[in-house]
Amino acid sequence: MTETPLRVVLADDHPLLRHGLRSLLEEVGAAEVVGEAETGERAVELALELEPDVVVMDLAMPGAGGIEATRAIIDARPDMGVLVLTMSEDDASVFAALRAGARGYVLKGSDGGDFLGAVRAVARGEAVYGPGVASRISRFLTAGPSPTPFSDLTAREREILDLLADGLSNADIAAKLFLSMKTVKNHLTSIFAKLQVADRAQAAVRARQAGLGS
């Protein structure tokens, strides 16, 4: 009896990469690529329409990025497997993807066997991460608690985060602190990375949970 092939949607804005992944999955991995998306929005549409076993998701795509697309897919289909395949290995990207609901995180430099193994593992409902990513997660989970909330933020970053938790826009924060918009944006980028969040909304939630904001 022939085993039903895994059904996969590929989301990446590089056609040549998608072609290579399709060939690997279909010729070596005994899988079927049922759809291809060049944007995050299209990835969500195909995932909900085709209900594949696995969505292979790049993080950097036009329009809604991979984080937002992953979150939208998991919100609608909590059991769907999303495997992030990306060049980004910084902590902020890793943890933002995991918080969005990705079940796996593999770097594009991985070999074909590791990638196929990750696709199969995610399809089985397992969580799978490349060696470098796994070590980052391990360090995060085993690290002791910070002595104070957000102790790695600078005084200025804590001030901006407090105003963000109050609901102020970038322009409001800039005006209140007599800073340029560019400076505020640079501080926010640093804050998001240190808090390991993807956007303003997640940062605000974290800040309010820690008692910041009114």
Image: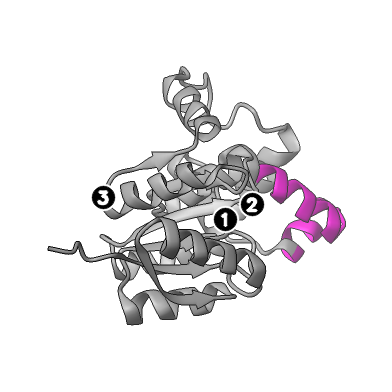
Residue depth check, mark 3 versus mark 1: number of the one nearer the observer:
3
The residue under the point 39% across, 54% down is 101
Q: Name the residue that disc number 2 marks.
A: 163
Q: Which mark is residue 125?
A: 3
Q: Is mark 3 on a helix, strand or loop?
A: loop
Q: Distance between the residues labelled 2 and 3?
A: 40 Å
Crowdedness near tag 1: few (<14), some (14–19) or many (≥20) residues, C-alpha within 10 Å = some
Residue 178 lies in the magenta stretch: yes
| Res. 53 image quadrant | bottom left
Task: Kindly identify the amino acid type of the residue bearing the numbered disc 2.
Answer: Leu
Instruction: Tell me whether the residue at label 1 lies in contact with that at label 2, contact meaning CB atoms closer than 8 angstroms.
Output: yes
- Quick check: 30 above or below 138? below
Residue depth check, mark 2 versus mark 3: number of the one nearer the observer:
3
Crowdedness near tag 3: few (<14), some (14–19) or many (≥20) residues, C-alpha within 10 Å = some
Crowdedness near tag 2: few (<14), some (14–19) or many (≥20) residues, C-alpha within 10 Å = many
* Among numbered discs 3 and 1, the one appearing first in the sequence: 3
The residue under the point 42% across, 50% down is 116
